Amino acid sequence: MYKNAISLIGFVGKDPKVKMTDGGKKYALFSLATNEYIGRTEDGTKKDRTDWHRVIAWGKLADYVEGYIRQGCHVAVDGPVRHSTYEKDGRIFFGVSVKADAVLKLDRTPKTAPAKPGRGRTAPKKQVARKKATQRQFSELDF
């Protein structure tokens, strides 16, 4: 059996755009940046390559994205890769996107509070608070 699936971990490029189809289905679009280390230059400077991925989430997942995901959020996305074509002004365009089956926010902001603009991260003042936040994140994961 063959499976079309991709798992990405990266940072959200811009705030998601939430829209509705003509049929009334809600969806959220956002871009996700992933980085790959590719070596060092002759002077020793680290070189990375950044790839941008277009992600689309539908229905209840779009509601989650709308409420919790913002520019700069660190997220994990799982889902199949989709290829599409469309015509505009007599030209044919090709597109690639990821249809999100799962979106997991990896930032340390509590799950019950909406994400804040910016990087979406909070820095606890005490080590104890950081440990409790991490334990809370892992206890909320479904395995």
Image (tube, grey):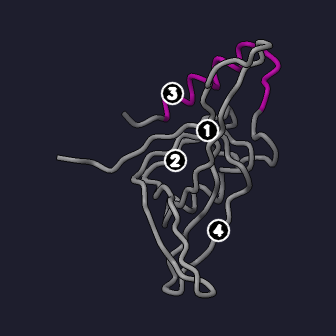
Give whichever of discs 4 and 1 has the lower sequence position: 4
The CA span between labels 3 and 1 is 23 Å
Q: Please name whichever residue, 134 or 7, is drawn nearer the observer in this view of the structure.
A: 7
Give whichever of discs 4 and 3 has the lower sequence position: 4
Q: Answer yes or no: do the residues labelled 3 and 1 have beta carbons within 8 Å?
A: no
The residue at the point 53 percent across, 86 percent down is 22
Single out the mark in the foreground, 3 or 1: 1
- Mark 1 is surrounded, within 10 Å at the Cα level, by few (under 14), some (14 to 19) or many (20 or more) other residues, namely some
The residue at the point 66 percent across, 41 percent down is 11
Q: Where is mark 4, residue-wise?
A: 18
The CA span between labels 2 and 3 is 15 Å
The CA span between labels 4 and 1 is 22 Å
Single out the mark in the foreground, 4 or 1: 1
Q: Where is mark 1, residue-wise?
A: 34
Residue 138, numbered circle: 3
Magenta-colored stretch includes residue 137: yes
